[in-house]
Amino acid sequence: MEYLKYTPEMARDWKNAINASEGYLRKRVADSMNESQLVSKLWLVEELSNLNVKPVNISLLAGWFAQYIVPLLYDNIESVEWIENFEMDRDIKRVAYKFNTRYKKEDKYKVSIRNVMFGNLISLSSPTFDTVINCSCEHMYPMSKFKKLKNTGVDDNALYILQSSNDTQYDDHINCVNDADELADQANLIDVLYAGEKLLPNGMTRFMVIGR
Amino acid sequence: MKNTILCVKWGDKYGNEYVEKLKDQVEKNCSVPFNFYCLTDNPTQSYDVQLPTTWDAYENGNFWAYRKMYMFNEKTIDIKGDRFLYLDLDVIIQQDLKYFFDIDMERPYIVKGWWNDIEVCKKNFAKFQSPMINSSVIRWNRAQLQKVYKHINDNLDVIFFTYPTIDNYLNHFWYNMHEEARSDVDRPDKSFLNVFPKGDIYSWYKGNVFPDDMEPKKRREDCKICLFNNSGEDNDTEELKLLWNT
């Protein structure tokens, strides 16, 4: 997968999102839109498309502004019906909605402010999630914990799509891994459908596993 | 007595003289009766109370500071009183501590670092850095913080792994930086923790109130307590000892 479809609706939403991001948020938005962020999300959707799976309701953990992953999933994975982005930072919510207003209006996207490692994620509007995406595993406790939590709304046989990094130079990278196998082990994945790594333009090696 | 003032000492960072000096300061600066306790890993004095060790198994380099949180469950540490005031060992008490026992206690209190730039605190929120609050002084009534203790006790592995300091943890879970500043963000609800008003407590190294009163290493007699903590960087204990004697 080589590109994101830049539609007029997306242009409208992104312009509104960037206009809504003031002060320090503007830099954070810029960081979230760099080349490596896009490459890693294109990689994720490409490998997911290659598998014989049909994600419907997606729990997106720590999805940040989610301006790339949400349209990439809706544009390329026909089965997707709902994406809920669980973020702990209250500050991102307003801008995250602006980026994906078109999906919010169609009742296909929600941002919920939650720390995902402490459970109690679901609300009345949440479906049962058949798929979990976490592209921020290096920022949190190993995913085996999440799988044991109650009230996450995640099906016992859910598909997990996980990305992490071996880049330890940042203080908030509290859980880096050395390879994709370690990432799969951390999540206790038994049936690994995909495992790979990619050198990103920023020099960081990204690892990804897809499995149950 | 209903009022209790307590501190925590473990390891060898601070000697007994810090506890004695704190006790001396509170005796000179508290016009209401109070109990005094020091929770410690090495009890030697009549006011010492043994710190529990139940969380020691989770030691991972971040855990050391969390020992302070045992005091949130008064049943665990068996201390008397109904109204509690915790003080770090490296503080200078400048005014009557009665003030802290007279304040409205709808919610427990913690220090808000008024010297912090809130924009920096918000920017670093997700990085577990620059917490707006500071646990050097905490005021609570019996049982008010047991909910926090239970949350920690139920999530020891994740909390000790994720949050390098208790201030970061408390900032993430029990304080809402946005409650005063914004109304259009998710859950603009009241924080569980209340904060001491502007001007009550200042930092020797960082200042008083951002951006107007930020001169470091300046004595502010109008404030009630001066904090000496500096996120573990460049703490000058000799400087603190000199101020004890002024």
Image (tube, coloured by chain):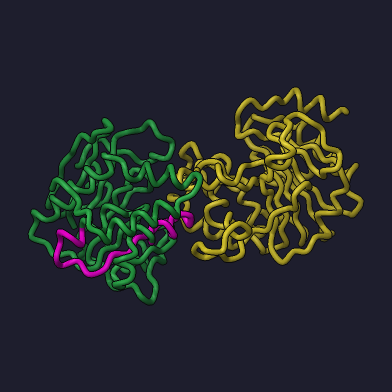
Chain colours: A green, B yellow
Determine whether, in the image, residue B204 is placed left or right of residue A9.
right
A204, above or below B143, in the image: above
Q: Is residue A120 left or right of residue A127?
A: right
x 22%, y 70%: residue: A81
The answer to if A91 sits in the magenta stretch is yes
Residue at 39% from the left image edge and 66% from the top image edge: A121
Q: Nearer the viewer, residue A192 or B119?
A: B119
Q: Visible in this render: residue B234?
A: yes
Q: Is residue B203 above or below residue A65?
A: above
x 22%, y 66%: residue: A130
- Between B117 and A5, the residue placed more toward the observer is A5
Report x, y in % for residue A90: 48, 57
In this rendering, the answer to whether A32 lies above or below B77 is: above
Residues in magenta? Answer: A73-97
Q: Position of residue B155 (x, y in %)?
A: 46, 55
> What number of labels is visible?
0
Observer able to see residue B44: no
Quadrant of the snapshot with the C terminus of chain A: bottom left
Most extreme residue toward the top, as rendered? B238
